[in-house]
Amino acid sequence: MIRKFDREAYRWEGVAPHVYKQDSAVFRDVTKQVLFEDEGDLPVQFRYFQVEPGGWSSFEHHEHMHMVVIFRGEGHALIGDEVHEVREGDLITIPPWAWHQFRADRGVPLGFFCLVNARRDAPSYPTEAEEAALREKPEVAAFLDGKA
Ligand code: MN
């Protein structure tokens, strides 16, 4: 089976984008498309997320891992307590319990594929104390304030 890619819309045939609630404290201007889901002997979900310019993905952690491939644009990613510049083609492994967030803070959309186990735990979000501890690193504080 093949589902063709629309390179203008960044959509795939038969895949409906899910638009998250806007202007949340947790995420902003993010869409998710589930491209493959728990098929045959591959118990995984393979998704495409797109963060629009100025937006960000959830700031979260969980036991399950992510494998991420940046597909479109550029921006920054927080992984654990490290801030990285990311751009099209980069490969990112997010280990269990590493805090993570993606930000489209370069004036262009940031699109990425993300692989997860089909059976996975729910994310949790930082408490005020956990965020304060992360913000002790100036580059992390700058990232979270959209000034990376
Ligand atoms: Mn996650």
Image (spheres, rainbow, N blue to C red):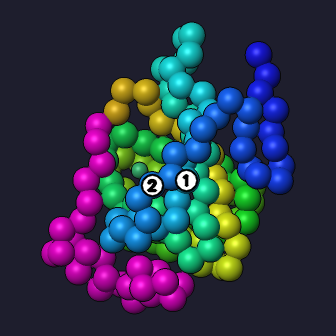
Q: Give the image quarter of residue 37.
A: top right
Horizontal arrangement in the rendering, residue 102 relative to residue 35 (left or right)? left
Residue 56 in sight here: yes
Q: Residue at x 81, y 32 (%)?
A: 4
Three-letter amino acid code of the residue under disc 1: Thr
Image: magenta residue range: 121-148
Q: Quadrant of residue 46?
A: top right
Q: Determine if the magenta segment contains residue 140.
A: yes
Total marks drawn?
A: 2
- Residue assigned mark 2: 20
- Say the numbered circle drawn on residue 48: none
Using the image, tell me which numbered label, if any, was put on residue 31.
Answer: 1
Residue 70, percent from left and from top? 67, 55
Q: Residues within 10 Å of mark 1 (few under 14, many from 20)?
A: some
Circle 2 packing at 10 Å, graded few (<14), some (14-19), many (20+), is some
| SS category of the residue bearing label 2 | loop
Q: Residue at x 18, y 75 (%)?
A: 128
Q: Are marks 1 and 2 in contact (CB under 8 Å)?
A: yes
Assess mark 2: CB under 8 A from ligand 1?
Answer: no
* Residue at x-position 60% and y-position 28%: 36
The x, y position of residue 99, in whole percent, is 36, 61
- 35 left or right, relative to 9: left
Query: Is residue 78 placed above or below 9 in the rendered structure?
Result: below
Q: Closer to the camera, 12 or 140? A: 12
Say which amino acid is labelled 2.
Tyr
Observer-nearest of 6 and 115: 6
Which quarter of the image is occupied by the N terminus? top right
Camera-nearest residue between 72 and 82: 72
User: Does 113 sit left or right of 122 as displayed?
Assistant: right
